[in-house]
Image (tube, grey):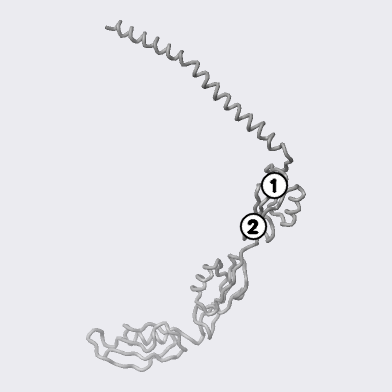
Amino acid sequence: MLDFSNFVVHYFLIFVGERIKGLLPYFYVLIGFFAILIISIIVLDKIVFPLLIHSGDTVKMPNLIGMKISDAENLLKSLDLKLARVNELFSANYPPGTVINQSPRAGQVIKKGREVFITISQGREEVVVPNLIGKHIRDSRIILKNIGLDIGNLSYVNSENFGVDSIVAQSPQYGTKVPYGTQIDVVVSRGSVNLVKVPYLEGLNLDAASKLLFESELEVGELSYVESQTYLPNTVLQQSLKAGSLVPKGTKIALTIVK
């Protein structure tokens, strides 16, 4: 049984070897084809194409970035190149009228007479400063953010004409054109030196409410008494002026109290 297996394997290997020998000519042809293809590509890339490109008058594209448009145009003319189109874009990095982009790129070898496209800077984008006077500082921040500006230096003053945290003055003035991203300095009101905020008194007992009014430089006004099954006696149920209101110092606040 073992001899028969060896016999089969032996003749199988002979058969496979004969088949491979028969395919070798085709294998050599295939290798030759790929070798010729690779050589042809190299010849075209390194010899033929460069000869075709340099068969006419050529020039190396200069670097125009950062040049004034008039200087760039004169340089192109001296190299027998044509300025085809000029685009404009805002740029914070280049002053107005200078080249910020070009096509073809610098260093590229091109034929004389070719058209060149450039983009020049319009300078930094400008926006109009809005009027912030009388607006709350919080609202002013939002307004400025929405147009690409921001709050700069803050200073505070007392004011009889503007409420607490309202803008009293600004710099630059509204209507001025400024570059995108500029910070606007503002002066903010602390409120009047003669005005104070009314405290929240409801729910306090009369003694505590009286003390809080005194500390706020206000006074207890007329007292009205009502019956209540819910609150303890002497509890403040209502106050005549709303909490948070700005009133002159010494103002009397009328209270409604539980009997």
Residue at 34% across / 90% down in the picture? Answer: 255
Q: Position of residue 84 (x, y in %)?
A: 68, 53
Q: Quadrant of the C terminus?
A: bottom left
Q: Quarter-wise, where is residue 1 in the image?
A: top left
Residue at 54% across / 83% down in the picture? Answer: 159
| Helix, strand or loop at mark 2 | strand
Q: Position of residue 198 (x, y in %)?
A: 41, 84
| 53 vs 211, nearest the viewer | 53
Residue bearing mark 2: 87
Residue occupying the far left of the picture: 229
Residue bearing mark 1: 114
| Helix, strand or loop at mark 1 | loop
Compared with 120, 210 (above or below) is: below
Q: In the rendered view, does 237 fall on the left or right side of 212? A: left
Neighbours of disc 1 within 10 Å: few (<14), some (14-19), many (20+): some
Q: Amino acid at mark 2?
A: Asn
Residue at 73% across / 43% down in the picture? Answer: 59
Compared with 90, 206 (above or below) is: below
